[in-house]
């Protein structure tokens, strides 16, 4: 008994050290990413003088708003050692559901609430699949994605559902001091979830269950409880993303966000979130997201053919990952 | 223990709410999308024919994806035509997978379909589909996408949208009506033109080119540098959002241009462009047109006229009628593929490509045209 307690104490201490060094690494990682972002912005600003403008910055942030919200949930889950491939399908389903609710005369706030509850419920469903039935998160959430996608098409009969309620449209289209609301949501939610992850006990428990679940369990953390919260967060944020997109486009479409889960995962990984869990940050994810969008936006601005854009985007990702790998190896030495 | 039970009950309750919310939310249309393997054979019975079944012909519709409204419209129209013309429809959704479509084709053959209408999952697999079907003695009519060999020659009769003409019709409307919109196109040097396409789809490229070529004829003094392609192939976002991103970026990159003419070769693209125009504040200086009109109608029904001024409107029935007519000529009347629609056989081709091109609708006339 004493022996196991002793081992546990050593493990916890090691976790503490690892955590500190991991934080330093992450800080450095963000610096690297910021440098990459500055280089991207500088190059495109030279190639097109309108690139470095307020309106284009808004374009980049606007384009990031949906994927960014999905990326928040993904970052949490990947750090915790999980993944959610259903987030985009939840978003699409929520957008359609909101449009249908609005069409049926339900007040917009209630419609929004219904979609958020739906998101939470699907999050719990994902958690049940992974925690109670012990299914692999990748496969379980893929199955959920398929179900949500199917339900999305079923409830709207495959047709887009127009939205004419101006109050609801306002949640996606209103601008405050020229800044679109979805951009404000994005920034606020990144700040809130960044704070939770870095500064709270819950945030630390996410790192611990992703880095060393056994140690986490021994230190009193219930990985199932934490992962349930993570899936619920992912579900709610995804539902919110889908609903705001529906408001922005004045229409709910069952295919609206499909495929975006991979962009969200890409943003998280580019931002330094480790696929093996236990490390990464919301800040890094945000910078990764902005790098991807700035790059895509810049290529369009300078009229690069779409096929070359795909090649260039792949190269950017590989380049950033290699740079990150190089930096990690250097630090290890 | 009590807490644990309560939590589990809560989880169960929420999951049940989710299921009931979804089931209770609406009626599913008869053409509910059907992913292929639903009944292991990827086939769905779509009609209940009550007429004399000995005369009933079974037509199989191989579809690229039921996730687009167009496909559902075609299925709905074919179902309606089936009731009128006494044929039974079975259909299958390839969900963009060529492999799945070939499996579904074999299922159709095993189930004794008499003829096949096919929106091919990948234009490169047209030969495989036609050869397999013809070996089994089953004729094929292509829907929306041309079915060609490696020399770009048709290998079976097809029905398609007259893509170039649709684009051109939109620009004809702009040329004739811009003064009524309040957007001043009198100074051609200040006009910018954007065609919104997905360059991965051949038909969309032709639509865009049709619009662009006609635009250049009608507005010859627009500088070439003011003409842009918003290509959503580069953007991994959903269609409308991708179009939004591309168009708003072009606007930001070209602030010197004062008036804009846009053509979304699909209405989803036009929807995204419409939001981009509104967000950047160009509603009074842009004319947006689209190929496909359902979403434009949705906008107009909301009371908004600008900036989406016109749309080329066509329906699934336009395509379905031609497809059914061609196939029944072969199956029922005994004609061979080369004999149908002789008026649509182009020089050098063996088979016809029957075309439809839609009608221009606007805020002012759509209620008269769209019943």
Image (tube, rainbow, N blue to C red):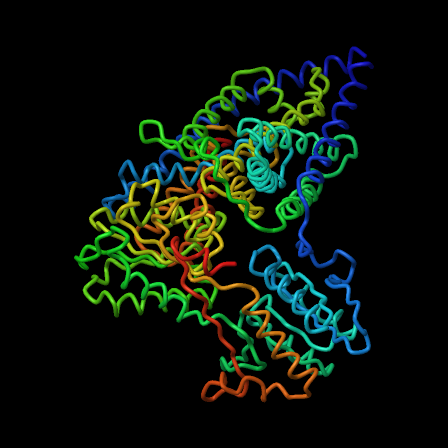
Q: Is residue A322 above or below residue B206?
A: above
Q: Quadrant of residue B90?
A: bottom right
Q: Is residue B220 above or below residue A20?
A: below
Q: Quadrant of residue B12?
A: top right
Q: Residue at x 76, y 20 (%)?
A: B7
Query: Of B31 and B149, which appears nearest the observer?
Result: B31
Q: Position of residue B154 (x, y in %)?
A: 53, 81
Q: Is residue B301 above or below residue A13?
A: below
Q: Residue at x 66, y 65 (%)?
A: B80
Q: Is residue B167 visible?
A: yes
Q: Residue at x 81, y 19 (%)?
A: B5
Q: From the viewer's perspective, is A297 left or right of A15?
A: left
Query: Of A194 and B137, which appears nearest the observer?
Result: B137
Q: Position of residue B24 (x, y in %)?
A: 70, 38
Q: Position of residue A143 (x, y in %)?
A: 70, 44
Q: Residue at x 49, y 19 (%)?
A: A195
- Of all residues, the one furthest to the front in this rendering is B368
Q: Is residue A286 above or below residue B27?
A: above
Q: Quadrant of residue B327?
A: bottom right
Q: From the viewer's perspective, is A65 left or right of A228?
A: left
Q: From the viewer's perspective, is B304 left or right of B108?
A: left
Q: Position of residue A285 (x, y in %)?
A: 48, 33
Figure label count: 0
Q: Is residue A47 visible?
A: no
């Amino acid at each position: 008994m004493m022996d196991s307690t002793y081992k546990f104490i050593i493990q916890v201490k090691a976790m503490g050290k690892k955590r500190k060094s991991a934080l330093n690494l992450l800080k450095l990682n963000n610096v690297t990413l910021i440098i990459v972002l500055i280089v991207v912005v500088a190059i495109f600003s030279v190639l097109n003088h309108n690139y470095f403008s307020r309106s284009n910055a808004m374009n980049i942030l606007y384009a990031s708003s949906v994927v960014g919200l999905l990326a928040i949930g993904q970052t949490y889950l990947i750090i915790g050692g999980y993944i959610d491939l259903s987030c985009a399908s939840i978003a699409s389903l929520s957008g359609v559901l909101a449009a249908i609710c609005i069409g049926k005369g339900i007040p917009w706030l209630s419609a929004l609430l219904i979609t958020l509850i739906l998101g939470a419920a699907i999050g719990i469903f994902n958690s049940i699949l992974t925690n109670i039935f012990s299914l692999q998160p990748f496969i379980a959430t893929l199955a959920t994605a398929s179900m949500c996608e199917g339900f999305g098409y079923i409830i709207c009969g495959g047709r887009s559902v127009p939205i004419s309620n101006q109050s609801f449209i306002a949640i996606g289209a209103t601008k405050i001091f020229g800044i679109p609301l979805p951009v404000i949501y994005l920034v606020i939610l990144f700040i809130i979830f960044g704070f939770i992850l870095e500064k709270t006990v819950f945030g630390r428990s996410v790192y611990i269950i992703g880095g060393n679940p056994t140690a986490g369990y021994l230190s009193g953390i219930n990985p199932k409880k934490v992962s349930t919260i993570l899936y619920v967060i992912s579900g709610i944020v995804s539902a919110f993303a889908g609903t705001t997109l529906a408001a922005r486009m004045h229409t709910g479409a069952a295919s609206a966000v499909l495929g975006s889960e991979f962009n969200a995962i890409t943003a998280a990984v580019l931002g330094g979130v480790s696929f093996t869990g236990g490390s990464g940050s919301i800040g890094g994810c945000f910078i990764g997201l902005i790098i991807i969008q700035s790059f895509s936006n810049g290529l369009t601005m300078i009229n690069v053919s779409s096929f070359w854009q795909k090649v260039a985007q792949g190269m950017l990702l590989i380049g950033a990952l290699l740079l990150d790998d190089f930096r990690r190896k250097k630090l290890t030495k | 223990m009590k807490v644990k039970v309560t939590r589990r009950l809560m989880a169960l309750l929420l999951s049940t709410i989710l299921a009931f919310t979804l089931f209770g939310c609406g009626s599913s249309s008869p053409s509910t999308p059907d992913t292929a393997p639903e009944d292991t054979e990827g086939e769905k019975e779509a009609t209940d024919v009550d007429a004399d079944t000995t005369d009933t012909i079974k037509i199989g519709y191989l579809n690229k994806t039921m996730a687009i409204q167009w496909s559902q419209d075609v299925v709905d129209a074919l179902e309606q035509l089936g009731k009128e013309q006494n044929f039974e429809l079975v259909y299958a959704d390839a969900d963009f997978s060529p492999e799945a479509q070939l499996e579904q084709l074999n299922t159709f053959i095993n189930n004794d379909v008499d003829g096949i209408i096919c929106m091919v999952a990948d234009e490169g697999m047209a030969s495989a589909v036609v050869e397999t079907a013809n070996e089994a003695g089953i004729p094929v009519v292509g829907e929306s996408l041309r079915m060609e060999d490696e020399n770009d020659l048709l290998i079976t009769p097809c029905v398609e949208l007259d893509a170039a003409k649709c684009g051109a019709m939109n620009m004809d409307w702009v040329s004739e009506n811009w003064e009524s919109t309040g957007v001043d196109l009198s100074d051609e040097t200040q006009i910018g033109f954007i065609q919104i396409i997905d360059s991965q789809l051949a038909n969309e490229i032709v639509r865009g080119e049709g619009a662009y070529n006609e635009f250049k004829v009608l507005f010859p003094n627009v500088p070439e540098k003011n003409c842009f392609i918003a290509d959503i192939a580069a953007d991994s976002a959903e269609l409308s959002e991708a179009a939004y991103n591309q168009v708003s970026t072009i606007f930001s990159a070209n602030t010197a241009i004062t008036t804009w003419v846009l053509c979304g070769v699909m209405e989803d693209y036009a929807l995204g462009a419409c939001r981009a125009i509104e967000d950047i504040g160009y509603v009074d200086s842009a004319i947006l047109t689209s190929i496909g009109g359902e979403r434009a109608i949705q906008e107009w029904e909301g009371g908004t006229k600008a900036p989406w001024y016109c749309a080329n409107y066509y329906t699934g029935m336009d395509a379905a009628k031609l497809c059914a007519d061609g196939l029944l000529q072969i199956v029922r009347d005994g004609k061979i593929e080369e004999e149908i629609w002789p008026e649509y056989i182009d020089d050098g081709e063996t088979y016809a490509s029957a075309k439809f091109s839609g009608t221009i609708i606007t805020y002012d006339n759509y209620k008269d045209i769209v019943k």
